[in-house]
Amino acid sequence: MHVLHVVGARPNFMKASPVMRALQAYPGVRQTLVHTGQHYDANMSDVFLKQLEMPAPDVNLGVGSRSHARQTAEIMIGFEQVVLDRRPDVVLVYGDVNSTIATALVCAKLQVRTAHVEAGVRSNDRSMPEEINRVVTDCLADLLLTPSEDAEQNLRAAGVDPSRIRFVGNVLIDSLVRLLPAARAVKDPRIPEQFGLVTLHRPSNVDDSVNLKSLLETLVEINNDLRIVFPVHPRTRQRLGALGSEFKDLLLLDPMPYIEFLSIQSRATVVLTDSGGVQAETTFLGVPCLTLRSNTEWPVTVQLGSNVLVGNDRQRLRQELLRIREGRVREASIPPLWDGHTGQRIAKIVCEIATSSAPSCLS
Ligand code: UD1
């Protein structure tokens, strides 16, 4: 049986790694890794493959940065040929990036069985490019592997046939569980004893310079009381460059490798973020998280976990920070099936469907 995995952007690597590792336990399974090249900087891609002990990609489409339409189209053109040449039995696509929607669409047209890992997740905000990617990918994929109970409910509410859905848990947590001991051993001399960790890359926060400037001014104010550590995503770095050097008091770092980032995430007093993955990871770690967005695709992190949505409301942000600084931290628990074994559950299901009766048009 031939399973093909698609990765393209930073968050995909932590999700594909546990599934690839779990499939190694099945002797009849051959695996191919395709990297679209959506992320291409060494510190956004290569270092993740290395730390997660993933094999070198069999194919790299090298699409790089483009407008959404061009990036999606170039991935489709390159990936169509890969599927025609390699004839996988099943293709696994991960998360909600442009590489996910592009390759799911190619597979649907070629009638190759596709499984979407992290299906059903919704922010219900169609101004986010990722939300469009999630909705369309879930329409196209044959098998929808959900990370949380709300994701399953979203799919059922959209009228998806329940036979296509399996609740498997959050695969991102598998990589965290595996590499947390290595992360705990890392000592970075630049990082203070107490600090607030910031990550920002959503277009809604960083593409509008007025918004970004106001957010940075708030971070400078917070920095007077609690040192701000801010590994800067390349997209955000471009925007910061245009704003000048007035934010130099913040500890601005390059994007960090997975283990080093996990290390500081697990030690942070509080995390301020607009990332989906970081909301999930802080909930697992029990680290207080303030999400700088008005909605979340991970409502379970707010209901059960350590996450609070503060949106654009600076007063709310200050109040929540004060609460955390005074030790008034919310009771948080880990959502069901965020247990480090999701990759194994996915591997078992994928092997079952890949050998099921319905043939693909390529076989
Ligand atoms: C993408 C995903 C987002 C994910 C994020 C994680 C989509 C629509 N968005 O957003 O869901 O949370 O990855 O990082 O797929 N750049 C570099 N080096 C790189 C990659 C990007 O310098 O290796 C710069 C480029 O100038 C590019 C910009 O960052 O224009 C944005 O990259 P892009 O892949 O378009 O989207 P992200 O913002 O990274």
Image: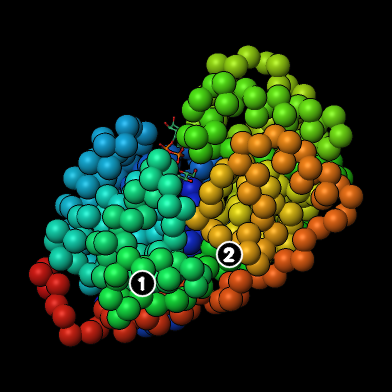
The span from disc 2 to disc 1 (Cα, nearest Å) is 17 Å
Q: Is residue 50 left or right of residue 128?
A: right
- Residue 156's disc number: 1
Which quadrant of the rendered structure holds the N terminus?
Answer: bottom left
Q: Nearer the viewer, residue 19 or 220?
A: 220
Quarter holding ligand 1: top left
Question: From the viewer's perspective, is residue 9 above or below residue 184?
Answer: above
**Quarter of the view holding residue 328:** bottom right
**Quarter of the view holding residue 352:** bottom left
The residue positioned 19% from the left and 45% from the top of the image is: 77
Q: Nearer the viewer, residue 255 or 149?
A: 149
Q: Position of residue 19 (x, y in %)?
A: 45, 70
Q: Is residue 289 visible?
A: yes
Q: Position of residue 247 (x, y in %)?
A: 71, 22
Which quadrant of the rendered structure holds the C terminus?
Answer: bottom left
Label 1 residue near ligand 1, CB within 8 Å: no
Q: Which residue is mark 2?
A: 300
Q: Three-letter amino acid code at disc 2?
A: Val
Question: From the viewer's perspective, is residue 318 above or below residue 179?
Answer: above
Q: Is residue 260 visible?
A: no
For mark 2, give the secondary structure: helix
Q: Is residue 129 left or right of residue 80?
A: right
Q: Position of residue 319 (x, y in %)?
A: 79, 42
